[in-house]
Structures are given as C-alpha cells and as structure tokens.
C-alpha cells in the first residue's frame, strides 16, 4: 500500500470534524436566536431585563470567599457601584461577617443553594431544604432575606420553579453574552473583553467570588468598573435593574405561568 493511500482517508477524516463542529455551532446559534440573543426570559426567570437605560447587574456566585469577597466589595464601593452576591449557605455559616459586609455596603444578597448541587437531580423536598436553609442562614448572618435565587450551573426544572414560588424567590440566570467565564482563569484581559465586548442595557453579568483563587476576577473587575463609568453605564443590584425595566416589571415577585414547556438549562458554568 502506497503512502498516499494511507494519507487520503486520514485527511478525509480531518475534514469531517471541523465540518461537524460547524454544523453543531450552527444548530446552537439557531436555537439561541429563536430564544433571543441574550436569553430566554419567562415569568419568574430573568436572563436580562428589557430596558433602554444604560444599567447592568454585576453578579458574583459561590461566596463568601475571603479574601476575594472583601477585595470585590472594596472595588465596588470605591467605584460607587452596586452588585448582587449569590451566596452558598455552607459558605454563609463559615463567613457570616462577609455577608454582613455585603449588606452594609449596599449590595444585594441572593440564594445560590446550600451545597451547590445540581437541583435538577434533587427531589422537590431536597430543593426546598437547600434553598430554605440558605434563606435562614443569610437572615441569621445579616438580617435580610433574599428575594432572588440562582440555581447552581444554571440548571433547573419545574420543581425548582415551584419551590421558588413557595419561598417568594425570583430566578436570575445571566445574559448569554455576559458569562465572564472567570472561573477558568483566562486572564483579566480576557474577562474584560468578554464582559465589555457585548454589553447591552439590562444585561446580567456572571462572575464568581468563590470556588478558588479569584485574583483575576478582582483585577478584571477594577478595569470593568472604570470602563463602565467612562462609558456612562451604571452598575446596580438585580432589584434595581428590574425597577429600570421598560416593560413595567417593578418587583421581583414570582409570577409563574401555567405553561409546562421545556425548562431550559443555562449555558454551562460553575
Ligand atoms: Zn455556582
């Protein structure tokens, strides 16, 4: 068998994989454009808030996590910016002082479950315990009760929506173009580009203060806050973002439709 006879089919297979990747990417893009460029809002579930005001909600998941939570709070406070922290109950009981510090600095605290389980794999009762324990821990630490929750990995089903309604929680995911992917430590510049490159009014931006060394998040945040100010953006809490909605939604009260349509999972994240 000649050399070329081996090469040709090998080269053929090399063509196949990029072609398949393009097909898959095309299908994903088609799905997303049907759902909207930024996410798939539905009653009680927010991916962004429709508004023409230059406001954005910066959100930080998986904390509190010293020293990064404190460094992020300092950066936000210096920039006169506000944000929302989606805390884990198990972290709240370890570091209640940092939840108090978040509230004292004018930030909003949301519920990111107790233990960061995928809620799609839990029973309704287990989901209720994950969320209620965290509500109680935040209240014990800082005297406030969250009105927003974000499911770990952005994964949820009808049971989570049902429990949210019972607990008075609205769900906040994040805008599809505003996943900073900071957890992958891609470098502060990459984080800045991802966030600022596609920013639209009413976007919800996903960062993490927990889950590891978040030095890059802190460094990127300082640049992002300066850029936001220079470009006339205001960083607000989720409740403030909703109040800026053009469609008159003014409170995070949970409004659930009877629709039992397929409940989507968010893009993969921590
Ligand atoms: Zn998380």
Image (cartoon, rainbow, N blue to C red):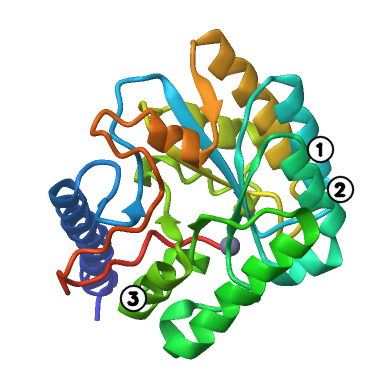
- Residue at 49% over, 17% down: 233
178 versus 113 height, above or below: above
79 versus 37 height, above or below: above
Image position, residue 62 (x, y; %): 66, 60
Q: Which dot marks residue 46? A: none
Element carrying mark 3: loop
The image quarter in which residue 143 lies: bottom right
Element carrying mark 1: helix
Q: Say if mark 2 contacts mark 1, CB within 8 Å.
A: yes
Neighbor class of circle 3 (other Cα within 10 Å; few <14, some 14-19, many 20+) is some
Neighbor class of circle 1 (other Cα within 10 Å; few <14, some 14-19, many 20+) is some
Q: Is residue 55 left or right of residue 6?
A: right
| Alpha-carbon span between mark 1 and mark 3 | 34 Å
- Residue at 80% over, 49% down: 100
Mark 3 residue's CB less than 8 Å from ligand 1:
no
Element carrying mark 2: loop
Q: Which dot marks residue 71? A: 1
User: Which mark sits nearer the N-terminus, 1 or 3?
Assistant: 1
Quadrant containing the C terminus is bottom right
The answer, for residue 44, to whether it is visible in the render is: yes
54 versus 126 height, above or below: above
User: Which mark sits nearer the N-terminus, 2 or 3?
Assistant: 2
- Residue at 40% over, 75% down: 160
Q: Say if mark 1 contacts mark 3, CB within 8 Å.
A: no
The answer, for residue 215, to whether it is visible in the render is: no
The image quarter in which residue 12 lies: bottom left
Q: Is residue 26 left or right of residue 161?
A: left
| Alpha-carbon span between mark 2 and mark 1 | 6 Å
> Would you name the residue on which mark 2 appears?
67
Q: Quadrant of ligand 1?
A: bottom right
Q: Which dot marks residue 157? A: 3
Q: Is residue 161 left or right of residue 17?
A: right
């Amino acid at each position: 068998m000649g050399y070329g006879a081996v090469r040709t089919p090998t080269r053929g297979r090399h063509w196949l994989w990029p072609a398949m990747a393009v097909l898959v990417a095309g299908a994903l893009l088609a799905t997303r454009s049907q759902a909207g460029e930024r996410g798939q809002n539905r009653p009680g579930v927010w991916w962004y808030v429709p508004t023409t005001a230059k406001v954005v909600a910066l959100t930080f998941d998986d904390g509190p996590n010293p020293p990064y939570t404190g460094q992020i709070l300092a950066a936000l406070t210096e920039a006169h910016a506000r944000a929302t922290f989606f805390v884990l109950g198990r972290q709240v009981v370890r570091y209640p002082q940092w939840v108090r510090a978040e509230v004292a600095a004018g930030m909003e605290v949301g519920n990111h479950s107790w233990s960061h389980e995928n809620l799609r794999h839990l029973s309704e009762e287990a989901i209720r315990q994950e969320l209620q324990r965290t509500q109680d821990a935040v209240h014990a630490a800082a005297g406030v009760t969250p009105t927003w929750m974000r499911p770990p990995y952005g994964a949820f089903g009808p049971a989570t929506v049902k429990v949210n309604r019972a607990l008075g929680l609205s769900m906040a995911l994040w805008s599809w173009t505003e996943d900073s992917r900071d957890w992958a430590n891609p470098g502060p510049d990459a984080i800045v580009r991802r966030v600022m490159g596609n920013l639209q009014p009413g976007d919800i931006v996903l960062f993490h203060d927990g889950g590891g060394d978040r030095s890059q998040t802190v460094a990127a945040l300082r640049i992002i806050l300066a850029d936001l100010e220079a470009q006339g953006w205001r960083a607000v809490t989720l409740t403030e973002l909703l109040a800026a909605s053009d469609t008159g939604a003014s409170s995070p009260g949970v409004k659930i439709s009877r629709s039992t349509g397929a409940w989507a999972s968010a893009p993969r994240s921590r």
